Amino acid sequence: MKKSIGVIDLGSNTARLVIYEQDDSGMVAEIDNIKYSLRLSNHLRAGRLDEEGVAKTLTAMRQFKKLLDARKVTQAIGVATAAVRQAENGRELTAAIERESGISMRVLSGKEEARYGYLAVLNSMPVDEGITIDIGGGSTEVTYFRDRQLIESHSFPFGIVTLTSQFFREEVPSEEEFAQLRTFLADSLATCPWLANRQCPVIAIGGTARNLGKIHQRQVHYSMDSLHHYPIQADAVTNILNALRRLPLEERRQIPGVSKDRADVILAGMAAFESLLHYAQSDCLLVSNKGLRDGVLYETVWGEQPPASTAIVRERSALQFMNRYQVDQPHSRHVRDLALSLFDQLQQHALHSFGGFERQLLENAALLHDTGRTINVYEASEHTFYLLSNVLMAGYTHRERLLLAMIASYKTNKLAQSQIARHPDLLGKQDKSLVEKLGHLLLFSRVLDRSMTQAISAVRLASTGGEFVLSCTGKQPDLLEYSLLDEPLSKLSKAWKIPLKVVVDA
């Protein structure tokens, strides 16, 4: 039975409610997301949240409760971060929230906040070593992980709202003000020497990171509409920052990718990214679309430890897709087994030099090849490509997602060339051969279970006098599948440049 889980993040800049649906297998999918701009950091007066800040917060929580009730959410998890943590009357506020809305709020420590960002990244991105930075309104959390294990973490008592009010007096900061901010950030980072010279990706979490990613994507005319795991070179971060900081606020708001309610504080966040990239000697910033709320969710449903490998992240994502798009799982798993068996046997005969990554691509493409059927049977292939390339597949880079989508939806070489041409910034001519070979291998395996009854249990490849023979073991000799094999076998033989024939071993 499906159940809904609501996660409320009462941050120093915004409050956000995200509602997730968990299916019978334990997989979760986001089904609603709403935010409320509060700027609580601006309502801290002499260490206390003022009446206006408290009133705005209670209004937001009451509205969140109405949405939770409308969605029939039975489990709501509330967490509060820096502004509430730093306020003398923070506990009074959380008590008032529970009293008025019934929502129980847990005030996170800086260490907890940092760990949840780490959990969000490790449950959704293919990275084994990295630095995370989550800059909110009133605090900034950083972590360093290696071999997917959290090594160090720290929470700085400043964020985009507090840095902006501390260092910028005008909407266009002066050179002196920016120099002071950069000095402050460099001095702050120096208190965490474990960040120095790591030369690994810096993974940026939160709204400032998403805005930065959108700005850069529009500048370079990026071919995918996806932010999670989007890479930005360090010099590009500096270039964007230098361009934006010279603009008046209203002009900054008009820049494509900049949120209008973040334009006044975004410079401080970008400066923090720039400083960390420099201190860590990293040449790449990765944008994470997953953050604190997702980390809280993942801990709730999957436990405190992140997946031991990226392969587990990808397996979960594939299962989530199969559940969400009502894939016939006995059929898809059987097609996967047949495709991987052929892949392995071709390798044993030294007919390819593909490795574990290509094998995993084929495996998940086989599991997900029918994803588009839930939308329309007649254009199922086109819908499969669209879903796999546009809906987040956790654990993959953008290029890997495109390859997966092309293999899963493969129909013809011409279509594959068209798909590659649509993404020249991510794919190249060298990918054509990979997609063609694995695509035809999957097409052939799909025909082997065309009736979706798993009537053909196994396929064996043998070499006989310069010819390769595929022996099919089926329940009976007159299966539908056997009558359909001629065309896909001919195309498979052509794609792999090997002579193939099929014999029935009923």
Image (spheres, helix red, strand yellow):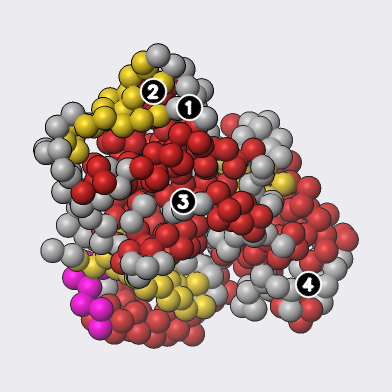
- Identify the mark nearer the N-term, 2 or 3: 3
According to the picture, the residue beneath numbered tag 3 turns out to be 410
Horizontal side of 357 relative to 238 (left or right) equals: left
Q: Can residue 39 be seen in this view?
A: yes
Separation of residues labelled 4 and 3 (CA atoms): 57 Å
Q: Are marks 2 and 1 in contact (CB under 8 Å)?
A: yes
Disc number lying in front (4 or 1):
1
Disc number lying in front (4 or 2):
2
Q: What residue type is labelled 4?
A: Arg
Q: What stretch is highlighted in magenta?
A: 70-76
Residue 45, placed above or below residue 316: below
Image position, residue 177 (x, y; %): 82, 61
According to the picture, the residue beneath numbered tag 2 turns out to be 468
Image position, residue 303 (x, y; %): 27, 45
Separation of residues labelled 4 and 2 (CA atoms): 76 Å
- Which quarter shows the N terminus? bottom left
According to the picture, the residue beneath numbered tag 4 turns out to be 169
User: Which class describes the residues within 10 Å of circle 2: few (<14), some (14-19), or many (20+)?
Assistant: some
According to the picture, the residue beneath numbered tag 1 turns out to be 498
Q: Is residue 101 visible?
A: no
Q: What residue type is labelled 1?
A: Ile
Disc number lying in front (4 or 3):
3
- Which quarter shows the C terminus? top left
Locate residue 85: give its quadrant.
Answer: bottom left
Separation of residues labelled 2 and 3 (CA atoms): 24 Å
Residue 181, placed above or below residue 73: above
Q: How many marks?
A: 4
User: Which class describes the residues within 10 Å of circle 1: few (<14), some (14-19), or many (20+)?
Assistant: some
